[in-house]
Amino acid sequence: MPDHTHPHPVPAPAARPLRLGVCGPVGTGKSSLIALLCRELSGRLELAVVTNDIYTDEDARFLRSAGVLAPERIRAVETGACPHTAIRDDISANLTTVEELEAAYPGLDLVLLESGGDNLTATFSPALVDAQIFVLDVAGGGDVARKGGPGIERADLLVVNKTDLAPYVGVDVSQMLADARTARGDRPVIGLSRTDRASVDALVAWVDDVRSSQAAGALIPVDRARWRATCMLTSTERTARTRVRVSPAEAGRCRVRSTVTLSGPTASSLRPVLVGHDRATARISLVPEGALLLAGDRVEVDVTVDSGARLDLVEPGGTVAFDMRGDRAHWDVRITLGRGAVLTWAGEPFIVSAGAAVERTTRVRLQDQAVLALRESLVLGRHGEGPGRVHQRTEVLSGDGPVLVEDLAVDALTAPALLGGHRVMSSVLLVGATPPADAREHRFDLEGGATLWRRLGVHAHEADLGTAWQAARRGAGGGA
Amino acid sequence: MSHPELILLLLADARLPVGGHTQSGTLEGALAHGLVAADVPGYLRTRLLSTTRVEAGTAVVARATVERGRALEPVERAWAARTVSPALREASRAQGHALLRLVRRTWPDLARPLDDLPRPSRSTVLGAVSAGLGLGAASLARLVAYDDVQTVCAAALKLLPLDPVAVTGWTAEALPGVADVVDAVSSAELPTDIPACSAPQIEAWAQAHAASTRRLFRA
């Protein structure tokens, strides 16, 4: 199976400057945007620029002539006939140039990389840049944002440039921005014009945000493209492995490392998005990328919280396992908690549609004094339909031995008996902490220092465990 | 030691003074939550696919553990981690206590491996003594599963107005399910081999039953 692992160990705070990529179609204003950033930031930051051009160093000359930066801090990489390749597949020429600049100017804060003008599919390799901006402009057509593509949908920032030109080219800027926001979910979009001070301030503020995330060691560069022309699937199974590891920091914010590994271009995955963090605690949202969960999908989530750190995991919404027409999917979670580590995971409903067949495993290892608060909700069948098949295995081991081992196989035949005709089973598991004295309903006290709340219902609200979850979160030392 | 078949008959006999009459296999809790007489055969099948496998597997592994001269504590722990309901753990330990009392008086040497466990479950006790009694793993699994069926059926006769012949018919119908349990668990050797098949609804009923008043059966 081809393996496209991109390990992104986030460097120690301020170990190297932030590398920020700028790409987008020809003529959208990438060079101008970089010139703008240089003008805005060069007073307080040490900057360098790498440009990519097909045959020439024209962009570098433009920037040098703009006088926004010392000429020797602007270097050109000639990409030949394929600007894609130089920023994504064979990044060696760009990487070499970045490293030369970093060596020549030890105090650098920010390296801006401008890709050659390309089409809508261009994205930077996460091994080259820490974050990337995709640039469109209103003059390229009002419908471009709606068309989408990897850069438009998944770049860290989408800039819709030259908004001041909209009246002259007959484009409705607000519609274009709305299209872009629809395509991007919660990722940021800025409508930019050099003549609109507020928009320039928004861009600069975004760069500052990214810089502070990186300086704190918590920026998670992720692959923004999931097409790979070189990748041929050899089986119908698609694996997406998400790894998250949180370690405490001596100073500053805790270290958050993540990788997303895809077996091929059609694999959907869970993308870890850092929502917030401080010295010992990180909060991460596991955001689905692509359609989950389909026949042949194998989703693997590997979460490690090191001794003394805390991770709060949330999910933006539930997961639906769709009709698999005789095939099946896998969903494997592995959790490792170091001594005194804390993990809370607020799982959203996992819905097993009629015709779906899912093998689900959850394996947890806790060292001494580690605490786990885990919420789950299993829903058999979407509204008004029968249950699919799900085989759910759970194994929770502490230093002393097993705490909870459970093997639940339900389908249309066994669900009525095992779940008493209920469609929804909600669970809250607290390990390693004493539960608050309240929340006694639906509670099963396990041995080995664990508590399980479990509730069955025909409808989701009948299986609600809100009180238990708040109690478990309090038990895990978090706010309710 | 007596012939293993005689030992099996002795242990499977409802007249064995180990408090079996106090148990309904959660049938009383199930009936209180809406099950009716016609559901009982299905209830038996569900148990044979879930909780009964945990019990039979635990007994088989306890037997193998004593044969190897290992400590029983990890077996008991594995059983507890697979038995979510505190009410069901308590019911099993109460039965284990009664069985251990019988074993200590009747076959004192066989009780020794259990000396280090404060309150062993019924399956751990049964499994631990079975090797010394000459019972093989399959016989032991058969005993545990059959006993579960008879526990539910005997309780059904007390809880529902039924013709006892009809109830015996349910027992007979459930025997292939008993044989399936034997196939599934008799080769287990280590605590990790014990099946972990759960039945969330039975566990919820068991908890509700333990908190109810005016019940006929302890569990």
Image (cartoon, coloured by chain):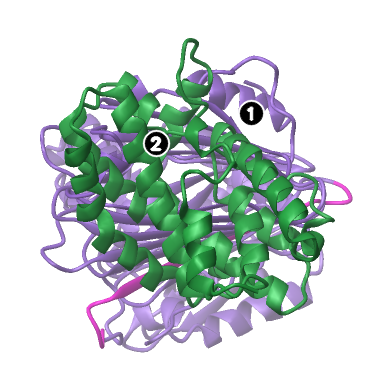
Chain colours: A purple, B green
Q: For mark 1, give the secondary structure.
A: helix
Callout 2, which amino acid? Ile
- Say whether residue A236 is magenta: yes
Q: What residue is pinned by disc 2? A: B202
Question: Is residue A232 magenta-colored?
Answer: no
User: In the rendered structure, the residue with mark 2 lies on which chain?
Assistant: B
Labels 1 and 2 share a subunit: no
Q: Quadrant of the N terminus of chain A?
A: bottom left
Q: Nearer the viewer, residue A380 or A340?
A: A380
Image quarter of the C terminus of chain A: top right
| Residue drawn at x 45%, y 41% as measured from the top left | A315
The residue positioned 37% from the left and 64% from the top of the image is B181
Residue A30 percent across, percent down from the top left: 41, 58
- Closest to the observer: A4 or B103? B103
Question: Magenta stretch?
Answer: A233-251
Instruction: Pinpoint the chain carrying mark 1.
Output: A
Check disc 1 and report the residue beneath it: A473
- In the image, is B120 to the left or to the right of B203? right
**Horizontal and vertical percent position of residue A419:** 31, 38
